[in-house]
Amino acid sequence: MNDVRVLRFGGSSFATPADYREVASYLHARVRSGERLVVVVDGMAGATERLRRLALAVNPAASASALNNLLPMAGTAGAGLLRVALEAQYISARQLLAHGNGLTSEPPGGRAARLLGWDPAPVRAALANHPIVVLAGGQAADMDRRPAWLGENSADLSAVALAVALGLDECELYADRDGVYSADPRLVPDAVLLPEPRAADVVTMASRGARVPHPGAVELAAGHGVRLVCRLGRGHLGRGSVIARDGTPVHAVVADLRSAVVELGTPETAQRLYEELVEARLPAHLLRTPHGRWVVAVTGGQVDVAGFLARHRLPGRLTGERLVTEVRAGRVVSHLAADAVAARALATHLHRVLRLPGPSLAAA
């Protein structure tokens, strides 16, 4: 299947109905050039959060299981809208739903399901009769064909799994930025694009709260020799970073303004909180500060940390600090800034030092 490509479009590509038509025109051109396309789609920009807010307005105590059943609907609608746009271009497209896309997971439960396997047969069968196959990202089915959600921002994971299943060596990821940067350009104006970042370092950056492709997707791609080609999801759709297993070691600064830092009185309680978060598959880091404080930093901003502490009866205190991380070719140095303003200033300073020629990089 040398003419098959897997493309993933994030929600930022679909801010308005016109964006669906624009993406459809781009895909039409790719088909005319002789390619067959598997297109993994997120929900329209903001659609998942609108569903979450609506659910919590109906029931502020909505369970994680109920939300996991509801939130994937945004992606399903997004894939359907793209198929509608493709029909307007007179392109025959097939939409695959969770129970028929070839991705299998553990049974759905109170948290995001784990991806277990990928079968290329459903996609290959659809491509035999249609030049484009469209499916919602982050969706799979368990062995009993019950739909399951793979979690926040997991469309990358779906796309990579399908690229692996189809035996491809490349997967294209279209998002609101064209790749991996040495720092968040919104916070650090001097941040630069990293053309060929090493996959292992990108996973580290993701765990520390960087806006980069899904860490599970990066790990899966690296394990199967799949390059991740990052592209802008709107406008000229330009090619940016190419993430690969044997890429260039990364020197970067990650300032996670959404992180939450919890101080705990003893190393035992800190270890317990850390283990509970890891068990829940949440991004957490157990740290001891130079002054002997034990803290757990939770990155990504998608966790109600205060609620988590209450549910697990842990006596932690939210400090208001933010986690700032230096990634130096696999070596990680953690810093705590007093607040978001201090984190931005610290990231700018660390990045300036990081980019200086000479000892700062040589020492890494």
Image (tube, grey):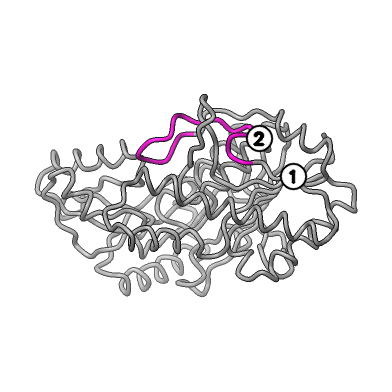
Kindly check if marks 1 and 2 are in contact, taking CB atoms under 8 A apart as contact. no
Q: Is the magenta stretch mostly helix, strand or loop?
A: loop
Image position of 190 (left or right of 51):
right
> Is disc 1 surrounded by few (<14), some (14 to 19) or many (20+) residues within 10 Å?
some
Residue 302's x, y, as percent? 36, 55
- Depth check: give the residue in front, 12 or 21: 21
Residue positioned most to the top: 143
Q: Which mark is nearer the camera, 1 or 2?
A: 1
- Location of residue 105 in the rendering, given as x and y in whole percent from the top left corner: 50, 31
x 52%, y 28%: residue = 116
Q: Within the magenta stretch, is there residue 156? A: no
Q: Which of 288 and 51 is in front in this view?
A: 51
Residue at point 33%, 63% (across, down): 57
Which secondary structure, mark 2? loop
Q: Which of 138 and 248 is in front in this view?
A: 138
- Residue 151 in the image, given as x and y percentages of width and height: 45, 45
Query: Which image quarter is the N terminus in?
Result: top right
Residue 104 among those drawn in magenta: yes
Residue carrying label 1: 94
Residue 360 vs 274, above or below: the answer is below
Q: Above or below — where is 342 with respect to 294?
A: below
In x, y percent, where is residue 127? 80, 38
Residue 111 picture quarter: top left
The disc, 1 or 2, on the residue closer to the chain's N-terminal end is 1
Residue identifier under label 2:
225
Is 94 placed left or right of 293 in the picture?
A: right
Please state if 98 lies on the left or on the right of 300 as rendered.
right
Q: Residue at x 49, y 56 (%)?
A: 361
- Gap between marks 1 and 2 measured at Cα: 28 Å
Residue type at mark 1? Arg
**Circle 1 — which element?**
strand
Residue segment shown in magenta: 97-114
